[in-house]
Image (cartoon, coloured by chain):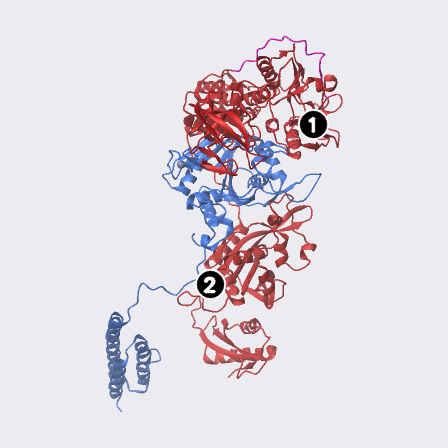
Chain colours: A red, B blue
Amino acid sequence: MRVPLRWLSEYVDLVLDPEELARRLTTAGVEVGEIIAAGDWQNIVVGEVVKLDKHPNADRLTLPTVDIGGGEQRQVVCGAPNIAVGQKIAYAAVGARLIDGHSGEPTVLRKAKIRGVESQGMVCSEKELGLGEAHEGILVLSAEASVGTPLSDVLGDTVFDFDLTPNRPDLFSVLGIAREVAALTGQKVRDPSIQYEEKGAAAKGRAKVTIADPDLCPRYVGAIIDGVKIGTSPDWMQECLTAAGLRPINNIVDITNYVMLEMGQPLHAFDYDRLARHHIIVRRAEAGEKMELIDGSKHTFTNEMLMIADAERSVAVAGVMGGFDSEVTDDTKTVLLEAANFNGPNIRRTSQALKARTDASTRFEKGLSEHLPPIAAARAVKLMVDHAGGRAAKGIIDEHPGKAKEGRVTVTMERLIRVLGMEPSTARIREILSGLGFGARWMPPDRFVVRVPYWRTDVSIADDVIEEIARIEGYDQLPTSQLRGQIPELVPQPRRDLRERVRDALANAGMQEIITYSLTDMESLQKVLPKGELAVTPPLRVSNPLSRQWEYARTTLRHALLDTLASNLRGDQSLISLFEMGRVYLPREDDLPNEAEMAVGVVSGREPDRWGRPTGDAAGFYAAKSRLAHVFSALRLTADYREATDSAYLPGRTAEVFVGGARVGLIGEVHPQVAERFDIGREVAMFEVDLDALLPHVSEVVHFQPVSPYPAVEEDLAIVVAEDVPAARALELIRASNLVANVSVFDVYSGDPIAAGKKSLAFAISYQAEGKTLSDADVAKERRRIVERLQRELAAELRA
Amino acid sequence: MPPDADVQQLEASALEELGAATDIAALEEWRVAYLGRKGRLTGLLRGLASLSIEERRTVGSAANELKQRLEEAHAARRRTVEEARVERVIVGERRDVTLPGPPLPRGRLHPITQTMRDIVSSLSGMGFQVAEGPEIEWDRYNFEALRIPPDHPARDMWDTLWIDYEMDGRHPMLLRTHTSPNQVRVMEQREPPIRIIVPGKCYRFEATDATHEWMLTQVEGLAVDEGISLTDLKGTLAEFARQMFGRDRKVGFRCDYFPFVEPGMECRIDCFICRGDGCRTCHRSGWIEILGAGMVHPEILANAGYDTERYTGFAFGMGVERIAMLRYGVDDIRHFYSNDLRFLRQF
Ligand SMILES: [Zn+2]
């Protein structure tokens, strides 16, 4: 919402400089997003078009000659269709600073040839001058503007562009802003005049208003103005509209727009003679009903949409836009002016469905006051009488089935202290509230009864009034304190604790954390999931995706890790290891999805040498496994790995991961065909852990085991077994011994002199007893038992 | 051979071997061989059992004196060896201290994780506990329970990504636009006093540019108890802002609107660039907004079944990306989720 300060100052004296005023307003919740110092124009003057030639090389361009005062003339090249001889226009000389009409960026005007003809400066549009968005045509100035005057003397003004909040429809008006300014600076508001003489015939009987759907239209005011002469509106009004970003059209339309901007009440002017039987019917649309609107767009309506109809057909979409057939034209003699109140949510729904968010609909949707229509109607009638030569009919038509009651709110000092934590003086409270137009009556011993002004539709409870006091006083003026109460009992968060521990463990294992988008596309999922899986359990889809790239809620993190890896490959063999802790969204019937917590990592490249160069082993299965093992070690968990297959992984180098008997994840080398889909041409190993599956097996409590005072006996043991015997099987058999405190594999070897199809496994075993020092004989006996077990179970041979 | 001779012979060979030991490992081997539990001196003493009491006394005391001499000789030799080693290093085995050690793998947490942890840790210190909730939510929790009914104009403040799932002609399921719905979930389950923070991802139907992302991370805070007022909210936020951005920061508040709080406010810190004078970065206001907050609307407390005469509360919410951008001077929010290692490895 753009408010020119010159216009604002008609309703309130501006006693602060613009910057300070903007700060005060912003602090009070009325945010000035931008201060536009329109008028800071240099090398731009009022010019008059004295001659208009055709461009020799382009049909759509013209060559106006502009009188720029002092007896000088300039010929420029112009593309605007609305340029005409006799117009006063804004002429920018070379060197002028303008806004580029296409890019919207500031630019400096240079000498240029356009299609072979030199342009000595240019004629500016509103957009180029930074006055608005209009760029289709040039800005036409008042005929009274004198040629050669700097443009800043004619149009110069400071404009506040407000970022308003949706709870304050009253602020979408210059008068509303003036009320805020008055309250903040201790000034008085000057209400605009709504006095006029009723010289026409009585309105009653000449038009009828029927509200068929009062749930959507609590009030409809119709006023009739006869004998209007359509023409241009006064210069001051055009300047106000232009500075506020609207384009002047004709006096009647300009007046409706002017009053909307001034008071916040959208109005609509119908051509009285084009309304069948002069009967306005406010009703829901018939399903499938069609109409062409003022902007030329054609729409089909549903029966949830509210229409303004005459006796025969719809003539406007209520609160959104007027119809083409009933709008005011140059021949209009009598105007029926609409000032109505509509149901906000309904208007919002309609304007969204029609993709027609207008100045009217954005105001109505926020919930305007039912008391505003007759006031705004009177204001517009007065302006039409004054500036369109109209005669106001006697009386107005006012259908008002809504009848909102006047708001009264009781505010106790006890509540005030409870919410604000402090107590302003009753005098100060009264001052603030009356400054804002509230009536505040003190009811001894402890409360105010507050009458809410009609325009403040947002105030309905005591806390709303308390906010008014606090924001005008200034939140910064209130004291500060710290929470004192009892700290609530701790609610354990095991899921989060686990996630953060795993996160730390992976980072400690040298992996870089990444965070990727939760949404993805079907192609990405197809790249990493088994064929058919997506058809069986389709992922959740977003019905209004920002782009096809972000259409589905991911059910895996594989693609995200591989994508990120691919985008970070730099053509060398440097080791890259990445992980992400994130959720996947597994659909459930008629319920929110299961948001499973995953930890997924990838590692690729060569391990660094002494100097950090990537010359070591290519990171494969074991590189991923050592990182995952780091996690289990940090969690003090033991994991089992069982060979498995999965479409994304390379067979023979893939395992399922089990903890406490439960499957918690997968690990393996990514299938080369899958890697290729991500343009990754090198080995990648990956692991995925489902933290929710892991959670039940994680214990926070560590049970201390006494350290044995008896020395351990360390021994090596080498056996030969068939190639396909997993080491874990042998380890399990060795560990079954009570005297084995620890065992680990330290060598795997196949080849000469080991027979084909066999391999040698070497174990480092640590024997230890709980209650005594083991003798050589004790160890020998236990070793024999272990070897026998290995021979029996695995057909192992002892290696010499 | 008389036992005395044994002692003498042992001493001679021990000292000879000791003289030959030139490093710490050899010295230790020598110590085990002569003075250890199974060493030769112990063996000699064990052999005493076969001698007469007289001989035993003589030889025993000679052996004990020998043990003392050998220990002294060992200590002296050890000093010599160590000094020689130090000498060797100084002369010929220096390290070029400017060379690197062998590389150890280095992993880092994402800057958003790091910032999130700092936020959580700051607020945990004030008694706030983490309570997490779903990212895909019902409209009921994300909007309606927060006083944002369907077709409410405030819905424009949170452009929404809807899940393609229809019920009664509407889309009831969405990607949560803020972490506030979990406030409602927690209040449904717990009684005051409540002090929680809700960290997590949120999503907006929003075109991406240097300051806007469609996926963002938020932390929401909620405190409900007897006697909580706006001054407590100000104090909590001011303390938080100073912990995050430095003790010398100025913290300011302005009125703002969120449907679920009344009064509502925005918390700001003085601009990093101009320190409050006004510049481009702060849109000439001198302030940089860091979060939105307010007193929980009594209707929301009442919906949770709380006695609104007895309990009041405050809530606040902030974007973690924004905080991280301000702390690290990151100029474009899109860096965070593009996951370029050249960016991530800086944190
Ligand atoms: Zn600044």
Q: Is residue A210 magenta?
A: yes
Label 2 chain ID: A
Q: Could you say which is closer to the camera, residue A28 or residue B23?
A: A28
Provide residue A137's location: percent of width, then percent of height.
55, 30
Tag 2, which secondary structure? loop
Q: What residue lies at 54% left-to-right and 28% top-to-bottom?
A: A52
Q: Nearer the viewer, residue A400 or A277?
A: A277
Element type where label 1 sits in the image: strand
Amino acid at dot 1: Leu
Q: Quadrant of residue A679?
A: bottom right
Q: Which residues are magenta?
A: A191-211
Is the CB–ligand 1 distance for label 2 below 8 Å? no
Q: Earlier in the sequence, mark 2 or mark 1?
A: 1
Q: Judge from the rendering whether residue B345 lies leftward or rightward of residue A453; answer left or right.
A: left
Question: Counting other residues with Cα less than 10 Å from the Cα at mark 2, is it few (<14), some (14-19), or many (20 or more)?
Answer: some
Instruction: Kindly identify which residue carries mark 1.
Output: A306
Q: Is residue B16 above or below residue A414?
A: below
Q: Residue A172 lies in magenta, yes or no?
A: no
Q: Residue furthest bottom?
A: B1
- A171 with respect to B151 (left or right): left
Q: What amino acid type is highlighted by mark number 2?
A: Ser
Residue A422 visible, this angle: no
Q: Position of residue A20 (x, y in %)?
A: 41, 26
Which quarter holds ligand 1?
top left
Distance between mark 2 and mark 1 Cα atoms = 66 Å
Picture coordinates of residue A438 (x, y %)? 52, 18
Q: Label 2 belongs to which residue?
A: A574
Mark 1 packing: few (<14 Cα in 10 Å), some, or many (20+)? many
> As rendered, which of A709 and A304 lies closer to the eye?
A304
The answer to whether the residue labelled 2 contacts the one labelled 1, judged by CB atoms less than 8 Å apart, is no
Q: Position of residue A606 (x, y in %)?
A: 48, 66
Q: Which mark is residue B137?
A: none
